């Protein structure tokens, strides 16, 4: 037997998927792969069984936990498949296990599939197979601040929607629907409000379930929005740290001072220690970007720039001469010699 595919992979999900996402992925795939929709298609039938099996396991919290830990080789009876003869009523050989012909070892979730297909195949008319909408992509420009702190953004796009005239069937009476010309979908301009999660990175993607292309008698696809973060005029992001430059005076650098340092979260009072050097770096812990995965925050790291007054006066020169006498040795002593 070929190696079993990962259940999450079967459903097109990642390991941390929520219960709702699992259910949604299942419903969508079940619609697409259902034997009624793909009569005689062996590959679709095999995929359908695979999807059934993955869903049966992943929807069960306990089994899912075990699967996350042990994978298909999981311990204990009844694990890794939909059916275990030892636990079935009547024991081995009892037969009569639920599941129609061609679906050995699987039982449908009656209610779920009833919902799913009742409306599609009821009413005596059998439309062309339902087709899920395509996943689509878009890009959105987000200000630095909103990407770091989280916020809302508006995305304008043209998007396929189920045709309002024919409801997606593409038909009007015996003819072709005049609104969508039989396509079942129409393109419409739309403005979407997009929630930007705190800590969003440049190039990061946000998934908007159901906001992709319209399905033909099927569910819509998802929209994947790639975030472009507008560079900030002052701050720069490096991982979860935020970098900035803070100018200080000669006196502040020499004698020390308390200054206000701007951070993305607002100004923070900070000490400049006596004897601070130009380009020295300081760190304000936890004032950077909050990591959306770990919840821990990066730091704000600022580099001081010692500003020298540009107006040169005799008094200023005297003060500078005094400062000059205080250096302990040659400031350029560490430069390489003889180049
Ligand atoms: Zn139409």
Image (spheres, rainbow, N blue to C red):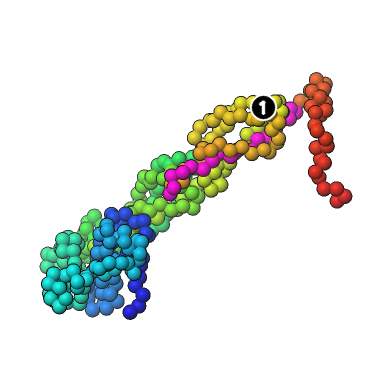
User: Which quarter of the rendered picture does the N terminus lie within?
Assistant: bottom left
Residue reaching furthest to the right: 338
Answer with left or right where residue 209 lies relative to residue 289: left
Residue 302 lies in the magenta stretch: yes
Image coords of residue 322 (percent x, y): 81, 24
Quarter of the rendering containing residue 63: bottom left
Nearer-the-camera pick, 13 or 68: 68
Residue 210 showing in the rendered view: no
Answer with left or right where residue 240 lies relative to residue 210: right
* Residue carrying label 1: 256
Q: Which residues are magenta?
A: 293-310
Image coords of residue 329 (percent x, y): 83, 35
Nearer-the-camera pick, 6 or 150: 6
Image coords of residue 25 (percent x, y): 30, 61
Answer with left or right where residue 238 lies relative to residue 319: left
Residue 22 showing in the rendered view: yes
Image coords of residue 211 (percent x, y): 33, 54
Secondary structure beneath dot 1 equals: loop
Quarter of the rendering containing residue 261: top right
Query: Which residue is found at the position 68% from the left and 38% from the top?
Result: 279
- Above or below residue 31? Residue 318 is above
Query: Which residue is found at the position 27% from the left and 78% from the top?
Result: 42
Residue 11 lies in the magenta stretch: no
């Amino acid at each position: 037997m070929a190696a079993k595919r990962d259940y999450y992979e079967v459903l097109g999900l990642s390991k941390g998927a929520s219960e709702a996402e699992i259910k949604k992925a299942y419903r969508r795939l079940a619609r697409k792969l259902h034997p009624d929709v793909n009569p005689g298609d062996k590959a679709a039938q095999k995929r359908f069984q695979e999807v059934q099996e993955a869903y049966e396991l992943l929807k069960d919290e306990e089994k899912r936990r075990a699967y996350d830990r042990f994978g298909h080789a999981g311990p204990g009876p009844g694990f890794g498949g939909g059916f275990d003869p030892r636990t079935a009523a009547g024991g081995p050989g009892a037969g009569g296990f639920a599941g129609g012909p061609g679906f050995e070892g699987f039982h449908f979730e009656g209610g779920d599939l009833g919902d799913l297909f009742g409306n599609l195949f009821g009413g005596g008319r059998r439309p062309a197979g339902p087709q899920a909408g395509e996943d689509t992509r878009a890009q959105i420009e987000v200000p630095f601040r909103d990407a770091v702190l989280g916020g809302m953004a508006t995305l304008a796009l043209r998007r396929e929607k189920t045709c309002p005239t024919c409801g997606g069937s593409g038909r009007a009476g015996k003819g072709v629907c005049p609104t969508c010309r039989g396509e079942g979908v129409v393109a419409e301009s739309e403005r979407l409000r997009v929630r930007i999660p705190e800590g969003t990175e440049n190039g990061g993607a946000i998934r908007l379930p159901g906001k992709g292309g319209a399905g033909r008698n099927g569910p819509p696809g998802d929209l994947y929005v790639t975030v472009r973060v507008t560079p900030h005029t002052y701050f720069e992001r490096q991982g979860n740290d935020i970098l900035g430059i803070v100018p200080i005076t000669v006196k502040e650098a020499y004698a020390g001072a308390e200054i206000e340092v701007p951070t993305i979260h607002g100004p923070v009072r900070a000490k400049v220690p006596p004897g601070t050097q130009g380009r020295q770096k300081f760190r304000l812990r936890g004032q950077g970007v909050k990591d959306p995965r770990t919840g821990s925050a990066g730091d704000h790291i600022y580099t001081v720039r010692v500003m020298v007054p540009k107006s040169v006066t005799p008094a200023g020169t005297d003060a500078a001469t005094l400062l000059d006498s205080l250096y302990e040795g040659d400031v350029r002593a560490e430069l390489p010699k003889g180049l």
